[in-house]
Amino acid sequence: MQEFSQSLKLMGNTFTITVVSPGIQDAEVHIQAAIEEIRRIEKLLTTFSNNSQTALINENAGIAPVPVAAEVFDLIKRSIGISQITQGAFDISYGSIDKTLWNFDKTMTALPPKEQALKMVHLIDYRNIILDEQYNSVFLKNKGMRIGFGGIGKGYAAEMARRLLMQNGVQSGIINASGDLTAWGAQPSGNPWRIGISNPDHPEDIFSYLDVSGKAVATSGNYEKYVMIGGKKYSHTIDPKTGLPISGIKSVTVISSNAEFADAMATPIAVMGIKAGLYLIDQIPDLHCIIIDDNNKLYTSKNINLIPHETLPS
């Protein structure tokens, strides 16, 4: 058995699909099936096409309910469930934030006024996403509300692609969506799949390893996109309650058996903060996390198999 991989741009991210297979032809058929599944989901969820179900829901905000495919309805229902357990730190109605409020590039030299930020987020409220089970319809209560799947979509796509490959008899592989990944089976050598946890200050430096066979891993980190204002680093992660960026946490890595859930939980844990985030993670079976704060201190949830380090190597 050998390992075969292909990388390409899907859903605005680089997806790398890896399968363990007896030969290249067999591998290519499976990889192509996974790509097509991810493209199918992208068409349903994208906000960049006027024909997607997401676009139709947004277009009819404050006007009328929109009947949607069962899987879109169920994904929105699960998203609302995650909003409830994170007390709104995860919220798919974040789409109403005006991009002019946050422009994470070198021209940004000051935070927007708190009042302006609050005005921008007044439409963000998962409780105003009304689901009708009878008609499989979604209604956004207020005009101007918008939903988006940026916080859960690629995890959902990775999860669905993994399930499809497993149904098709692929016993081992990895779906990696720009660092958020799900792995199953073993490497051709028989060893479990293993990933390195990056030092947020130097993402190319690995400070610890984690065996991930049968698991999904997602990371939210401020080393990807941030601005420095007054000597302080502000993450591109916005608190949906205030409209302002979070600070104090460099990265959150979440480990779960489900890629969608891991993807959805990484950002809200960063928004909730270390104490509340770890408390929540420890209440949920089969969910673990690693948090690194601005001072490079490492925090982990219970029962996580990492080599402990008090601080990262400098």
Image (tube, rainbow, N blue to C red):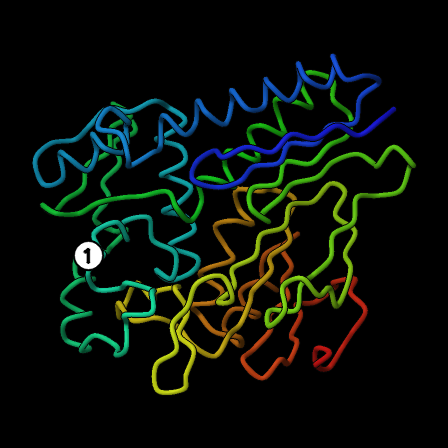
Residue 105 versus residue 286 in the image, above or below: below
Decide if residue 72 is on the left or right side of residue 286.
left
Percent x, y of residue 12 = 43, 40
Amino acid type indicated by mark 1: Asp
Give whichever of 289, 236 is nearer the camera. 236
Q: Quadrant of residue 299?
A: bottom right
Q: Quadrant of residue 52?
A: top left
Residue under the point 41% across and 68% down: 226
Could you tell me which quadrant the N terminus lies in? Answer: top right
Classed neighbour count for the residue bearing mark 1: other residues with Cα under 10 Å, few (<14), some (14–19), many (≥20): few
Percent x, y of residue 20 = 79, 27
Q: Kindly give the residue lying farthest to the front in the view shown.
A: 106
Q: Secondary structure at mark 1?
A: loop
Residue under the point 74% across and 63% down: 304
Residue 101 versus residue 212 in the image, above or below: below
Percent x, y of residue 293 = 56, 77
Residue under the point 34% across and 22% down: 69
Q: Kindly give the residue lying farthest to the bottom in the view shown.
A: 230
Could you tell me which quadrant the C terminus lies in? Answer: bottom right
Counting labels gives 1
Give whichever of 74, 242 is nearer the camera. 242
Q: Name the residue that disc number 1 marks.
A: 98
Give whichever of 198, 192 is nearer the camera. 198
Percent x, y of residue 137 = 24, 28
Residue 131 versus residue 84 in the image, above or below: above
Decide if residue 16 is on the left or right side of residue 246.
right
Residue under the point 35% across and 27% down: 44
Q: Kindly give the residue lying farthest to the right in the view shown.
A: 189
Decide if residue 156 is on the left or right side of residue 89.
right
